[in-house]
Amino acid sequence: MATLLKVDVVSAEASIFSGEAKFVSLPGESGELGVLPGHTPLISKIRPGTLKIVREDGTEELVFVAGGILEVQPFGVTVLSDTAIRAADLDEAKAEKARQQALEALESAHDKQDIAAVEAELAMLAAQVAAARRLANMKNRH
Protein backbone atom coordinates (compact mmCIF):
# COMPACT_ATOMS: atom_id res chain seq x y z
CA MET A 1 0.00 0.00 0.00
CA ALA A 2 1.29 3.46 -0.88
CA THR A 3 2.29 5.56 2.11
CA LEU A 4 2.18 8.99 0.47
CA LEU A 5 -0.40 11.33 -0.97
CA LYS A 6 0.00 13.32 -4.19
CA VAL A 7 -0.89 16.88 -3.14
CA ASP A 8 -1.76 19.77 -5.46
CA VAL A 9 -2.67 23.24 -4.19
CA VAL A 10 -3.76 25.61 -6.94
CA SER A 11 -4.85 29.25 -6.77
CA ALA A 12 -6.39 31.37 -9.50
CA GLU A 13 -2.90 32.75 -10.21
CA ALA A 14 -0.57 29.75 -9.94
CA SER A 15 0.24 26.29 -8.68
CA ILE A 16 1.27 26.86 -5.06
CA PHE A 17 2.36 23.32 -4.16
CA SER A 18 2.70 20.08 -6.04
CA GLY A 19 4.37 17.14 -4.38
CA GLU A 20 4.05 14.19 -2.04
CA ALA A 21 3.04 14.20 1.61
CA LYS A 22 2.29 11.74 4.36
CA PHE A 23 -0.44 13.93 5.94
CA VAL A 24 -2.53 16.97 5.08
CA SER A 25 -4.78 19.02 7.37
CA LEU A 26 -6.99 21.96 6.50
CA PRO A 27 -10.06 23.90 7.63
CA GLY A 28 -13.06 22.07 6.19
CA GLU A 29 -16.53 23.55 6.07
CA SER A 30 -17.60 21.46 9.09
CA GLY A 31 -14.29 21.60 10.99
CA GLU A 32 -10.64 20.59 10.70
CA LEU A 33 -9.98 17.78 8.24
CA GLY A 34 -7.00 15.46 8.38
CA VAL A 35 -6.12 13.31 5.38
CA LEU A 36 -3.82 10.29 5.36
CA PRO A 37 -3.05 7.95 2.44
CA GLY A 38 -6.00 5.63 1.78
CA HIS A 39 -8.59 8.22 2.89
CA THR A 40 -12.15 7.76 1.70
CA PRO A 41 -12.89 9.91 -1.37
CA LEU A 42 -14.72 13.16 -0.66
CA ILE A 43 -15.35 16.64 -1.97
CA SER A 44 -15.81 19.50 0.49
CA LYS A 45 -15.81 23.25 0.69
CA ILE A 46 -12.98 24.68 2.76
CA ARG A 47 -12.96 27.74 4.99
CA PRO A 48 -10.25 30.42 5.06
CA GLY A 49 -7.32 29.24 7.14
CA THR A 50 -4.08 27.31 7.12
CA LEU A 51 -3.44 24.19 5.07
CA LYS A 52 -0.66 22.04 6.57
CA ILE A 53 1.23 19.61 4.37
CA VAL A 54 3.57 17.17 6.17
CA ARG A 55 6.22 15.82 3.82
CA GLU A 56 7.71 12.33 4.02
CA ASP A 57 10.74 13.66 5.94
CA GLY A 58 8.48 15.34 8.52
CA THR A 59 9.01 18.91 7.33
CA GLU A 60 5.89 21.03 6.99
CA GLU A 61 4.66 23.34 4.27
CA LEU A 62 2.02 25.84 5.43
CA VAL A 63 -0.28 27.54 2.94
CA PHE A 64 -2.96 30.11 3.67
CA VAL A 65 -6.14 29.42 1.67
CA ALA A 66 -9.02 31.87 1.40
CA GLY A 67 -11.59 29.10 1.12
CA GLY A 68 -12.21 26.93 -1.89
CA ILE A 69 -12.82 23.31 -2.78
CA LEU A 70 -11.08 20.14 -1.59
CA GLU A 71 -11.07 16.85 -3.47
CA VAL A 72 -9.71 13.77 -1.71
CA GLN A 73 -8.99 10.50 -3.46
CA PRO A 74 -7.36 7.52 -1.68
CA PHE A 75 -3.86 8.67 -2.68
CA GLY A 76 -4.36 12.24 -3.81
CA VAL A 77 -5.49 15.60 -2.48
CA THR A 78 -6.37 18.59 -4.65
CA VAL A 79 -7.11 22.01 -3.20
CA LEU A 80 -8.56 24.70 -5.45
CA SER A 81 -8.66 28.19 -3.97
CA ASP A 82 -9.12 31.65 -5.46
CA THR A 83 -6.36 32.85 -3.15
CA ALA A 84 -3.57 30.67 -1.76
CA ILE A 85 -0.37 32.07 -0.27
CA ARG A 86 2.62 30.18 1.07
CA ALA A 87 2.87 30.96 4.78
CA ALA A 88 6.41 32.25 4.31
CA ASP A 89 5.01 34.89 1.93
CA LEU A 90 2.27 36.12 4.29
CA ASP A 91 2.65 39.69 5.46
CA GLU A 92 0.73 40.36 8.67
CA ALA A 93 1.02 44.15 8.38
CA LYS A 94 -0.35 44.19 4.81
CA ALA A 95 -3.19 41.84 5.74
CA GLU A 96 -4.08 43.95 8.79
CA LYS A 97 -4.06 47.14 6.70
CA ALA A 98 -6.35 45.51 4.12
CA ARG A 99 -8.63 44.35 6.97
CA GLN A 100 -8.87 47.90 8.30
CA GLN A 101 -9.71 49.19 4.81
CA ALA A 102 -12.41 46.53 4.49
CA LEU A 103 -13.87 47.60 7.86
CA GLU A 104 -14.05 51.18 6.57
CA ALA A 105 -15.72 49.97 3.38
CA LEU A 106 -18.26 48.04 5.46
CA GLU A 107 -19.25 51.25 7.26
CA SER A 108 -20.07 52.95 3.95
CA ALA A 109 -21.74 49.93 2.30
CA HIS A 110 -25.52 50.16 2.05
CA ASP A 111 -26.51 47.51 -0.46
CA LYS A 112 -26.99 43.98 0.97
CA GLN A 113 -24.84 42.51 -1.80
CA ASP A 114 -22.01 44.97 -1.07
CA ILE A 115 -22.26 44.25 2.66
CA ALA A 116 -22.08 40.49 2.04
CA ALA A 117 -19.05 40.87 -0.24
CA VAL A 118 -17.20 43.04 2.29
CA GLU A 119 -18.06 40.66 5.14
CA ALA A 120 -16.67 37.72 3.13
CA GLU A 121 -13.51 39.73 2.44
CA LEU A 122 -13.21 40.56 6.16
CA ALA A 123 -13.50 36.89 7.13
CA MET A 124 -10.76 35.96 4.65
CA LEU A 125 -8.48 38.78 5.83
CA ALA A 126 -9.03 37.94 9.50
CA ALA A 127 -8.02 34.33 8.78
CA GLN A 128 -4.98 35.56 6.85
CA VAL A 129 -3.88 37.81 9.75
CA ALA A 130 -4.35 34.91 12.19
CA ALA A 131 -2.32 32.57 9.98
CA ALA A 132 0.50 35.14 9.70
CA ARG A 133 0.53 35.57 13.49
CA ARG A 134 0.64 31.79 14.07
CA LEU A 135 3.57 31.50 11.67
CA ALA A 136 5.39 34.39 13.38
CA ASN A 137 4.84 32.76 16.79
CA MET A 138 6.16 29.43 15.48
CA LYS A 139 9.29 31.16 14.12
CA ASN A 140 9.85 32.98 17.43
CA ARG A 141 9.75 29.68 19.36
CA HIS A 142 12.58 28.17 17.30
Image: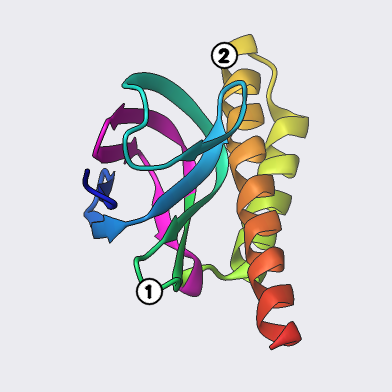
Looking at the image, residue 89 lies above or below residue 49: below
> Given the image, on which type of amino acid does mark 2 rest?
Gln
Q: Is residue 79 magenta?
A: yes
Q: For the point 68% across and 50% down, which residue is it?
A: 99
- Element type where label 1 sits in the image: loop
Residue furthest out toward the front:
1
Residue 33 position, x and y percent, is 54, 34
> Given the image, on which type of amino acid does mark 1 rest?
Asp
Residue 101 position, x and y percent, is 67, 50
Q: Is residue 140 left or right of residue 32?
A: right
Residue 5 position, x and y percent, is 27, 48
Q: Name the colour scheme.
A: rainbow
User: Who comes first in sequence, dot 2 or dot 1?
Assistant: 1
Residue 123 position, x and y percent, is 66, 36
Q: Residue 1 falls in which quadrant of the image?
A: top left
Residue bearing the label numbered 2? 113
- 17 or 59, which lies in front? 59
Q: Residue 138 falls in which quadrant of the image?
A: bottom right
- Element type where label 2 sits in the image: helix
Majority SS type along the magenta span:
strand
The residues bearing labels 2 and 1 have C-alpha atoms spaced at a distance of 46 Å
Magenta-highlighted residues: 65-88
Residue bearing the label numbered 1? 57
- 138 or 55, which lies in front? 55
